[in-house]
């Protein structure tokens, strides 16, 4: 749901807020992120902002390192 909100929001501040929440969730509960890695990788191509792409990559990397190694 957060990924969908990121794409729907037109204001940068709202997008940043949702990305911040997603980043926090990824750090606190990486197991919740694992099932959504494929969706996140698809959405990664649609994000225009370098900062947002970097955030998504960080969340994905953290989930993989924490849960799959």
Image: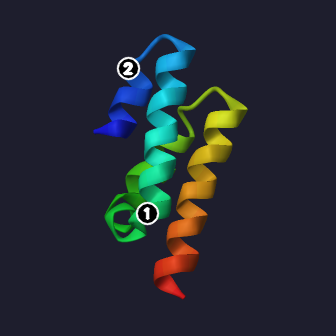
In this picture, is 69 found above or below 22?
Answer: below
The disc placed on residue 4 is: none
Find disc 1 in the rendering and name its residue: 28
Residues packed near mark 1 inside 10 Å, few (<14), some (14 to 19) or many (20 plus): few
Find disc 2 in the rendering and name its residue: 8
Rounded to the nearest angstrom, the CA distance separating label 2 from label 1 is: 25 Å
Quarter of the image where the N terminus is located: top left
Residue at 47% in and 11% down = 10
Q: Position of residue 45 (x, y in %)?
A: 57, 39
Which residue occupies the foreground of this view, 40 or 63?
A: 63
Q: Secondary structure at mark 1?
A: helix
Q: How is the image coloured?
A: rainbow
Residue at 41% in and 54% down = 25
Residue at 60% in and 65% down = 61
In the rendered structure, the answer to whether residue 38 lies left or right of residue 46 reads left
Residue 62, quarter of picture? bottom right
In this picture, is 55 found above or below 10?
Answer: below
Residues packed near mark 2 inside 10 Å, few (<14), some (14 to 19) or many (20 plus): few
Residue at 44% in and 41% down = 21
Quarter of the image where the C terminus is located: bottom right
């Amino acid at each position: 749901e957060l990924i969908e909100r990121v794409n729907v929001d037109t204001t940068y501040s709202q997008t940043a807020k949702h990305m911040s929440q997603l980043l926090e969730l990824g750090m606190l509960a990486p197991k919740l992120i694992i099932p959504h890695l494929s969706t996140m990788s698809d959405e990664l191509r649609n994000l225009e902002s370098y900062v947002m792409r970097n955030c998504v990559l960080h969340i994905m990397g953290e989930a993989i390192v924490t849960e799959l190694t």
